[in-house]
Image (spheres, rainbow, N blue to C red):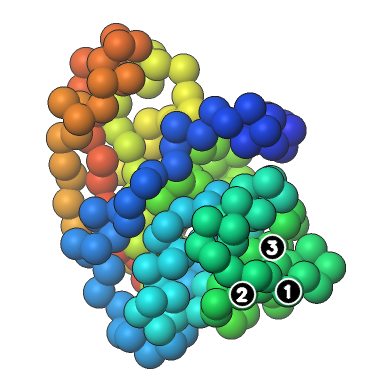
Amino acid sequence: MDPDFWRERWEEGRIGFHQSEVTPLLLAHWSMPRDGGCVFVPLAGKSLDMLWFASQGYSVLGVELSSLAIEQFFDEASLSPVRDGNEWSAGGITLIEGDVFELTAERLASCSYVYDRAALIALPPAMRERYMASVYGALPAACRGLLITLEYPQLEKVGPPFSVPESEVRAGLSGWSVELLERRDILAAQPKFIEEGVTALSTAAYSLARLQL
């Protein structure tokens, strides 16, 4: 999937993946210490979840391809970011304008936590395999996090968002402890999926912990 695909989605306002509220599964299942640690948010968009993390005392490091998404995030949050190269920072939140695959272990070394709601499910299968190996592989030892996915009959819909089954999560994150926290049927609340002919739709939340090498 070409990076320009996502930039065009933002430029055209086709951002149905953006939520106008903090993700309920985040509020239900985030159980990390309120220790002021850094939360890594891949493919961050303008997610309100980042503001929630900041309100809880965490620092946030996000990465986002679209400069428009970053501008909208800070503008809608009434924050005036300071720019340093490709990094925008304000209110304890730093957004890197760039490709998540280009992040290094050194840049992610300060991240104690990872929160993935819209990144893994945004990628087709081949890119998901690479993403889990390289991006999750660059996170530091003892990193912990929360992953939220979607599950539906993939043949019934052309992604994104894509269906990511539990078996793929466990296989791709073999260097992590993976605990399923909840699987919730959400089809009735997603009329666009129903209109596309999807017959079953669930969201799943996983607790993650990087295994010590």
Distance between mark 1 and mark 2 Cα atoms:
7 Å
User: Can residue 30 be seen at all in this image of the molecule?
Assistant: yes
Where, by quadrant of the figure, is residue 62 drawn? bottom right
Dot 1 amino acid type: Val
Residue type at numbered disc 3: Ile
Of the numbered discs 3 and 1, the one sitting upstream in the chain is 1
Crowding near pointer 1: few (<14 within 10 Å), some, many (20+)?
few
- Between 86 and 76, the one lying in front of the other is 76
> Which amino acid, mark 2?
Ala
Q: How many C-alpha atoms fall within 10 Å of the one at disc 2: few (<14), some, or many (≥20)?
A: some
Q: Is residue 113 above or below residue 146?
A: below
Left or right of 55: which side holds 110?
A: right
Circles 1 and 2: CB atoms closer than 8 Å: yes
Disc 3, SS = strand
Question: Label 3, on which residue?
Answer: 96
- Dot placed on the residue nearer the N-terminal end, 1 or 2: 1
Q: Which mark is residue 82?
A: 1
Residue drawn at x 72%, y 57% as measured from the top left: 97
Does dot 2 land on a helix, a strand or a loop? strand
Q: Which residue is denoted by mark 2 in the rendering? A: 90
Residue 78 in which image quadrant: bottom right
Query: x and y percent of residue 208 in the render?
Result: 35, 65
Name which residue lies at 69% across and 62% down: 96
Element carrying mark 1: strand
Q: Farthest residue in the right direction?
A: 85
Q: Name the residue: 38% across, 77% down.
A: 55
